Image (tube, helix red, strand yellow):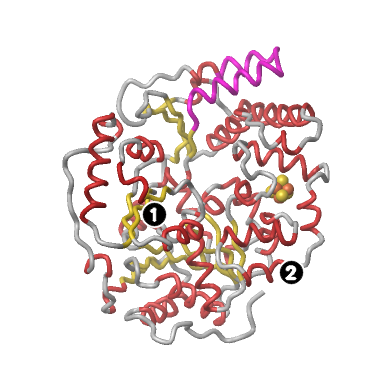
Amino acid sequence: MANEKEFVFPYEKPRIGQLELVKSILNLSGKNSVIVVAAPTGFGKTVSVLYSAVKVIEMGSIDRILYVVRTRNELDPVIKEAKSIGIDFTVIYSGRKMCPLAIDKKISNEGFWAICSILRLNNSCQYYNKAKLTSIETIIDILRKFEDHYSIAKNLANKLNICPYFSLLSLSEETSLTIATYPYLFKEHIWFSTLSHIDPSKTMLVVDEAHNIVNIGSVMGDSMDIESIKMAIEEIRRFYSHDDEVVKVLNRLSMVKVNEKGYKYVNKSSIGIDKAFIESISSIATDIALKTVLRVKGSIDEAMNIDLKILKLSKFLNSLSNQYFDLFASTTFNGTIELFALPISFEPIKNIVELFKLVILMSGTPPSKEFLVDVVKIKKSVSVVDVEDFGASNYIRENSSAVIFSNATTSYRSRDEHVYKTYSELIDEVYKVSGNGIIMTVYPSYDVMWNILKYTKSMEFSVIDKGEPLSVIKDILFSRNKVILHT
Ligand code: SF4
């Protein structure tokens, strides 16, 4: 698995602090510890940490690296640096996004995985069947040729006609570096069904943008709106006219009311949600998925357009079977009620961090040592390395100005047409006074973005991020002199 060659730092002139960071990580790596790396945007922490990791592999205390990032677009800088260092790697993200059969289909994630399992069980997915016969070298060849996650998956599907997801996943048993999105580490059921072949006691875990773990609900939690629960009840009624007990519990769940702001605790036992109930929903969901696929008589195209809410419900309830998770409800800004399965302690994060031989938590604003030791209660030794102590410059702090606009807020309860108009005027004004370059407008949600864009006059100079890979957006942006990116 590990490369035979000796690795060298890939850039001729390392930035101030990069080699010092490498040295610090190597010094601390023998301690079976957690290293918190504070490094500002633009420092080059990805290459420094990856280079340190391959050096630790050379020293023999670990034999692989698991590098997790929050979003798909954050995979690409890691791919770029893995290539510059020359380490063998694989990249794993949403199977639904990679699947050539699911392109442009309306299917939900949960529905997708149910259909994908049925297709694999029936030997009906040609991409999967061919992937099983394809050599690792052929897959690696595509990884070498393409620069970003999107092109890699697309070319595995289009050039080799193989399933990108399962090809890249099987490669993770061979490569020294696995680059994956957060759910592959933080969602227990995904970890167990995909990467559990990785032995944490011989692995360095790198968590990018590690400030996110402070908001544990955002990395481990799950949510489902009440309307989808009502639709799941209808699906059960269509297939199981007799299963009144299950429907009674779900009816109680769908009638949860929230009168106050914020999250309301909902006692799941008083509703009737227990292990046995969660298991019944799981088997009902599988059964309904099978029956639905049979109805479309093997048409993969039609199967990929089925959106069964019962599958989402089953996954949501499964999160609640974890002892550290509980049920909460909240009202969204448009008045609908959303249910949440949220962790009620930091124990799940602690368990993950303590599992790995060596952990690097890195960010421009990482969690503090006190938080990790006193709140998360990590028992391993925790060290903090701040690259500004080595004289590294903070590009953002030194090259930016802040303008505080206090005339509007996008907080849930203030959102209305007046607020949207105000923001659109602000964006048009910023465009007018700015010179050439890219103006990036970041919105709290797609919903807010589309509402503001209704009023924006500078639309012809705009590029809208509709969830495309960064590589695609980058090409469009770089073809213009002055442009606003809405994201
Ligand atoms: S096995 Fe088939 S259906 Fe499943 S992800 Fe791969 S290509 Fe898609």
Residue in the image at 22% along x and 48% along y: 429
Q: Is residue 396 left or right of residue 267?
A: left
Q: Is residue 454 at all visible to an observer of this figure?
A: yes
Real-space Cα separation, disc 1 to disc 2, in angstroms: 45 Å
Q: Is residue 441 above or below residue 234?
A: below
Q: Is residue 289 left or right of residue 107?
A: right
Residue 138 is marked as 2
Disc 1, SS? loop
Q: Is residue 201 above or below residue 70?
A: below
Residue in the image at 18% along x and 53% along y: 403
Q: Is residue 242 magenta?
A: yes
Query: Of label 1 and label 2, which has the lower sequence position?
Result: 2
Name the residue tied to disc 1: 377
> Magenta segment, which residues?
224-250
Most frequent secondary structure within the magenta stretch: helix
Q: Residue furthest front?
A: 460
Q: Amino acid at mark 1?
A: Lys
Residue in the image at 44% along x and 49% along y: 465
Where is residue 324 shown, x and y percent of the image? 48, 40
Q: Quadrant of the N terminus?
A: bottom right
Where is residue 458 shown, x and y percent of the image? 31, 46
Where is residue 111 shown, x and y percent of the image? 64, 36
Q: In this view of the protein, which residue sits in the foreground, 139 or 25?
A: 139
Q: Nearer the viewer, mark 1 or mark 2?
A: 2
Q: Is residue 365 left or right of residue 146?
A: left
Q: Is residue 325 above or below residue 198?
A: above
Q: In this view of the protein, which residue sits in the foreground, 341 or 405?
A: 405
Where is residue 150 shown, x and y percent of the image? 58, 58
Q: Is residue 44 magenta?
A: no
Q: Amino acid at mark 2?
A: Thr
